[in-house]
Amino acid sequence: MSYHDQHEFDEVLYNKTLDDPRISVETVYTSLTGIRITTTTASLSTLASVLIIFIIFRSKTKMGSVYHRIMFGMSFYDIIQSLAMAFTTVPMPKNMIYEQFEGLIIGTEDSCRAQGFMFIIGMLASTSYNAMLCLYYLFSLHFQLTDDKIKRYIEPALHALPSIAGLVGAWFSLHSDLIHPTPLVSYCVNMQYPYWCTEDESDCLLRDGYSYEGNVLMFRTTAAFFGITFLICILSLTVVVWSIFKRERNFRRAMNDVTTEGDETFSIRIREYRNEMVLTKSALRQSLYYVGALIAVFTVPLIALLSSRQSRSAEASTVDMSAYLQVLHVILRPSQGVFNLLIFVHYKVWALGRKERNQNLTVRGLLIAVVFLGVEAEEMPISSLEPVIRQEHINALDFAVSGDDEIPLESINFSVASSAGRIIDSTGGSRIEGISYGTSIPDTNGGLSWHDDGELPSNVSATSIGEDGTVL
């Protein structure tokens, strides 16, 4: 329904609005160049998010990891918001008060509301998923929870909160009739009508259900939402950085102890430390990149929003924001999916290249393997962060074995997830330090006795252990 169809149509106010010089302000957003840039970047973001989902389902892990499920949710909602931005001016009502848009306009009030609804739900939900991803790294890298525990106790909230935030925000905006076209962006969003509408509503084109107070409430709630989102990310990653710093410090101390003892077999334990620290640091870098992408996407829009609110005063006649910032806005704001894809693929390629470093694969070959063949490294930190958990076991496990009733170590089969640190021969016994998630030992009846969590038998005798943790 257009403004002309409203039962409280005020022809005097409408004509006054049309005569106001602020109504014809020209911005990058109203220009054909700005509209084309927005369409291009938003379309690329849509394709990038679709590609992330494609890679997830092509991979060996598929939706089997918490990280992949979070990235699926983030990409799904980014597709919604990117599609809304990609349509730019097309859904705007043909009889709106702004006539300076150079793009195609064939829509109605309902299509404008639909576009704004899609944009709001996609924006709030995909942004929330960035905070949820930071919390996931916090639980995995700092609290060292396994994917199974996160899935059971925490993951439902990681998906429910973004969906609720998006639905509530979009529903409130639609119900309160807050979605309108504006020359301050190239698509329908939450905005007064006209954009300089003030609190006393004397210069607002009122429509059914609209209230300035509702618009202010939505603005303040959105501002608080973004503040909380960034706060969660900053605090979570600060804790993770501190945790990794302490872990690195303990690692260096362990290396110093090895040097002092001069035990060459301790190098196995050092390699285990070093491998897991590499995985942990790579996961931290990845989380920092995601937050950096979020900042890049929203910094310029925040400046634009603050500038536009300043321009709504009765004395203002133009939008006081640099054209350069407007160009950055139309380039960066719709590009979240592109940034996410670059980070997502980069670390999958990095992990696969690290695993297959002896194969001399090119970057092109790694990209093809990751994107089209679904190949991924098992130790990839973004696919499963459980390897990091073994750090705690390295510090905790210290197996000492001695006695008369000895079981030959050759009869012990270490599990694939296990490793051993060293053997010290002393006074007729042996001592093993390292990690073992489980061992299988033949019993007297010819069967196998399984010892979980590295609980080696109390009496063991042996000669050596290979570098991969298997018995020689």
Image (spheres, rainbow, N blue to C red):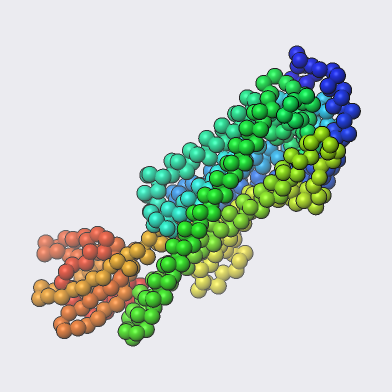
Q: Quadrant of residue 16?
A: top right
| Residue 43 in the image, given as x and y percentages of width and height | 70, 45
Compared with 222, 242 (above or below) is below
Write the residue at 10% across / 76% down: 404
Compared with 198, 251 (above or below) is below
Compared with 97, 132 (above or below) is below
Write the residue at 53% across / 40% down: 162
Write the residue at 65% across / 25% down: 176
Q: Quadrant of residue 307?
A: top right
Report whether 20 appears left or right of 43. right
Q: Quadrant of residue 31?
A: top right
Write the residue at 83% across / 28% down: 97
- State the residue in front, 11 or 345: 11
| Residue 467 in the image, given as x and y percentages of width and height | 35, 76
Residue 298 visible, this orientation:
yes
Q: Quadrant of the N terminus?
A: top right
Q: Quadrant of the C terminus?
A: bottom left
Report whether 227 appears left or right of 411. right
| Residue 441 in the image, given as x and y percentages of width and height | 19, 65
Residue 25 visible, this orientation:
no
Report whether 462 appears left or right of 86. left
- State the residue in front, 47 or 317: 317
Q: Residue furthest top?
A: 7
Q: How many marks?
A: 0
| Residue 63 in the image, given as x and y percentages of width and height | 47, 47
